[in-house]
Amino acid sequence: MSYNLSQSSLGKLTGVDANLQKVIKRAIELTEQDFMVLQGMRTREECSINYGKGRTAQECTAKGVPAQYAQPNLAKVTWLRDPYGSKHTQGKAVDIVPYPLDWNDLSKYQKIATAMKRAASELNVKVTWGGDWATSKDYPHFEV
């Protein structure tokens, strides 16, 4: 079966590194698991929102994030020391998830990663997958 990126996914690639875009566009042709781009470029406000998840107002303000973004009752979604240091802010990272969305089936993320790694190899682009990180795995995350 072959898949195509949706208009929504293509739109989320705006501002993303050209080589990373090429890898994603090739990976959708290779994959055994349909996927969508959940996020590419991230604004400063989106960084603040993410950093605030799972943190108190005091923890946020200590890192320069306005207290209004604190959401201590939610699960943490980022472990960055610098809340604004994400490669998403530079267009050097994307989050890709299975379609239809499934947060829990890691085998689907493995299939996407296999396609991304194969595409990166074909195009001679160095891509890192968050699922390969030693700690704080981030299965949707790919970066150049």
Image (cartoon, grey):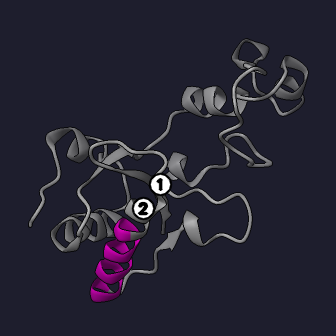
Determine the CA span between mark 2 and mark 1: 7 Å
Q: Residue at x 88, y 28 (%)?
A: 59
Between 73 and 69, which is closer to the camera in this rendering? 73
Amino acid carrying label 1: it is Pro
Q: Determine which of the numbered discs, if any, sits on residue 140 in the image.
A: 1
Residue 86, image x and y in percent? 61, 49
Considering the image in quadrants, where does the N terminus appear?
A: bottom left
Residue 136, image x and y in percent? 71, 57
Magenta span has 129?
Answer: no
Figure label count: 2
Position above or below: 45 against 42? above
Q: Determine which of the numbered discs, if any, sits on residue 86 in the image.
A: none
Q: Which residues are magenta?
A: 111-123
Q: Which secondary structure lies at badge 1?
A: loop
Residue linked to disc 2: 109
- The picture quadrant where one finds residue 41 is top left
Q: Residue furthest left?
A: 1
The majority secondary structure of the magenta stretch comes to helix
Residue 122, image x and y in percent? 27, 87
2 vs 1, front mark: 2
Magenta span has 117?
Answer: yes
Q: Cβ–Cβ below 8 Å for labels 2 and 1?
A: yes
Between 19 and 104, which is closer to the camera in this rendering? 104
Q: Residue at x 51, y 49 (%)?
A: 88
Position above or below: 78 against 62? below
Task: Please indicate whether residue 49 sits to the left or right of residue 90 in the image.
Answer: right
Between 85 and 3, which is closer to the camera in this rendering? 3
Q: Residue at x 80, y 48 (%)?
A: 81
Task: Please indicate whether residue 81 sits to the left or right of residue 78 in the image.
Answer: right
Question: How many residues crowd mark 2 within 10 Å: few (<14), some (14–19), many (20+)?
Answer: many
